Image (spheres, rainbow, N blue to C red):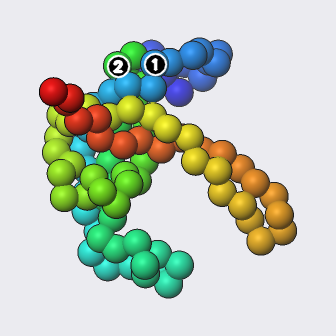
Amino acid sequence: MCPGCHSESWTWAELSGNGTVHTFTVTHQAFHPAWADRVPFAVATIELDEGVRMVSDLPPSDVERVAIGARVACFFEDHALDDGTTFTFPRFGLVYPTG
């Protein structure tokens, strides 16, 4: 739904995959046993350069460096279910300046 006009009409659009951390939280306690080996982990709301917001957990290497306003880029990660089905979903990681 459009946050401005509340329209439910939408179409697919290709986006850059680049954005900034709008807000985040770092979790130090597993909410489910399947996450026990992932703590601490960071979950962030990402504002893409085109204005769309998405939620993503960040890679473990980014947990100590995440900050509001930090630049991120999208990458895609494949996951397999127990029945052999696979699915791909977008994730974001911090982009560090070079040089």
The residue that appears at 53% across and 27% down in the rendered structure is: 1
Residue 46 x %, y %: 34, 37
Determine the secondary structure under disc 1: loop
Dot 2 alpha-carbon crowd within 10 angstroms: few under 14, some 14 to 19, many 20 or more? some
Residue 26 x %, y %: 25, 62
Taking 26 as reference, is 68 above or below it? Answer: above
Q: Residue furthest bottom?
A: 33
1 or 2: tag closer to the N-terminus? 1
Is label 1 in contact with label 2 (beta carbons under 8 Å)?
A: yes
> As rendered, which of 43 and 98 lies closer to the eye?
98
Q: Is residue 45 visible?
A: no
Horizontal side, residue 5 vs residue 80: left or right: left
The residue that appears at 77% across and 71% down in the rendered structure is: 82
- On the image, numbered disc 1 is attached to which residue? 16
Residue 25 picture quarter:
bottom left
Q: Amino acid at mark 2?
A: Asp
The residue that appears at 43% across and 78% down in the rendered structure is: 37
Q: Amino acid at mark 1?
A: Ser
> As rendered, which of 94 and 98 lies closer to the eye?
98
Horizontal side, residue 44 vs residue 65: left or right: right
Determine the secondary structure under disc 2: loop
- On the image, numbered disc 2 is attached to which residue? 49
Residue 85 x %, y %: 81, 58
Residue 52 picture quarter:
top left
Residue 53 x %, y %: 40, 32
Q: Is residue 57 visible?
A: yes
